[in-house]
Image (tube, rainbow, N blue to C red):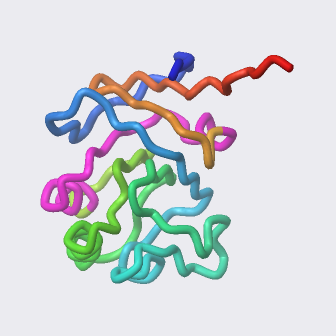
Amino acid sequence: MTYKKLPILLKPVLALDVEFIEASVLFSLKPISPLGDIDPDRGVINDPESNVKGENVARKILVTPYFRGSTVGPYILFALYRKKQAPSMIVVERTDPMLITGCVISKIPLYKAKNILSFKELSGLKVKITRSGEVYVKERSISSS
């Protein structure tokens, strides 16, 4: 499996002890509220106005501008973690104490991007993000006829 390095560098906020995370990208144009926008039992986005409505966040690299909401947000992330429905990683443009807390207790790596729009074309594709924040996309294998 070969990967192509992309001109994107993320800043680790909470990198944990992994060399890299490899998963599909789930790109949300809209900020996410864990309490209202994610079903804590199934990990499905249920915001009717979201471009990712009906998508499951489990084992995905969830990319969104920022998380919004109350102090309940960390507990929703923890509920997702306990039910094995949590994202593999979260990438945002803006962090806040509640998101960081939720990621710490749920063991979700958290990275910061200068501009998440660079991930828009990667939605649905498998990428690898290293501990230091380098981003690689899986190259499509070319079959010869």
User: Residue 23, how many percent across, how many down?
Assistant: 45, 43
Left or right: residue 6 versus residue 73 is right
Q: Is residue 6 above or below residue 117?
A: above
- Which residue sits furthest front? 145
Residue 11, percent across and down? 34, 30
Residue displayed at 42% across by 81% down = 39
Where residue 84 sits: x, y (%)? 28, 67
Q: Nearer the viewer, residue 4 or 36?
A: 4
Position in image of residue 1 (x %, y %): 51, 23
State the count of labels.
0
Residue 111 is left or right of residue 138, and the answer is: left
Front position in the image: 59 or 75: 59
- What residue is shown at x 21% (from left), y 75% (from top)? 75
Q: In which quarter of the image is residue 41?
A: bottom left
Q: Which residue lies furthest to the right in this view?
A: 145
Would you say residue 65 sits in the magenta stretch?
no
Residue at the spot x=38%, y=73% of the render? 34
At 38% from the left and 50% from the top, the residue drawn is 90
Reply above or below: 23 against 71.
above
Q: Horizontal placement of 29 versus 64: left or right?
A: right
Residue 142 is drawn in which quadrant?
top right
Quadrant where the C terminus sits is top right
Residue 118 shown in magenta:
yes
Chief secondary structure of the magenta portion: helix
Foreground pick, 47 / 130 = 130
Is 61 located above or below residue 15 in the figure? Answer: below
Magenta residue span: 99-121
